[in-house]
Amino acid sequence: MTAPTVLRAGVRLRSQACTTEAIVVRPGAGSVALTCGGHPMVDHADAPAGLEPLADLAGGTQVGKRYTAEADPSVEVLVTKAGVGTLADGTTPLVVKTAQPLPASD
């Protein structure tokens, strides 16, 4: 298995278990072990390993959505190609980042 890639802003990553591809928007404090389908994400230039997503981490990703970790909300990953694997911090699924409501103007 390929070693996990260090998170840095702008790094393009791919899943080893599905077609998911993503770009790191904000790397956070560096405490997140980014996985997809239960396997570490690897550099975009690496060939896919052809692994199968784990059953409990096969909920899929949505293209164009930003995902963040509950343990470190400063981490932000943008999905550029959807897949069947779930983005996660280890085995804890990432959540879709929601838009902040604008303040009301009178």
Image: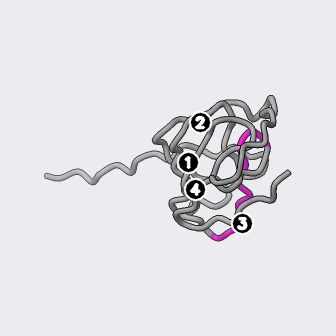
Of residues 64 and 18, which is closer to you in this image? 18
Instruction: Please name which of the two marks, 2 or 3, marks the residue nearer to the observer.
Output: 2
> Which residue extends farthest bottom?
29
Q: Examine the structure image and report whether residue 31 is included in the region drawn in magenta.
A: yes
Residue pointed to by mark 3: 31
x 78%, y 36%: residue: 50
User: Residue 70, how many percent across, how many down?
Assistant: 64, 53
- Crowd band around label 2 with a 10 angstrom C-alpha radius: few (<14), some (14–19), many (20+): many
71 and 43: which is toward the camera: 43
- Local SS, label 2: loop
The residue wearing badge 2 is 61
What mark, if any, has residue 77 been given in the picture? none
Which numbered disc flags the more N-terminal residue, 4 or 2? 4
Near mark 4 (Cα within 10 A), the count class, few <14, some 14-19 or many ≥20, is: many
Q: Which residue is mark 4?
A: 12
Dot in front, 1 or 2: 2
In the image, which is nearer the foreground, mark 1 or mark 4?
4
Please indicate whether residue 52 sits to the left or right of residue 79 in the image.
right
User: What range of the chain is rendered magenta?
Assistant: 29-38
- Residue tagged by mark 1? 67
Q: Secondary structure at mark 3?
A: loop
| Residue type of the residue flagged with mark 2 | Thr
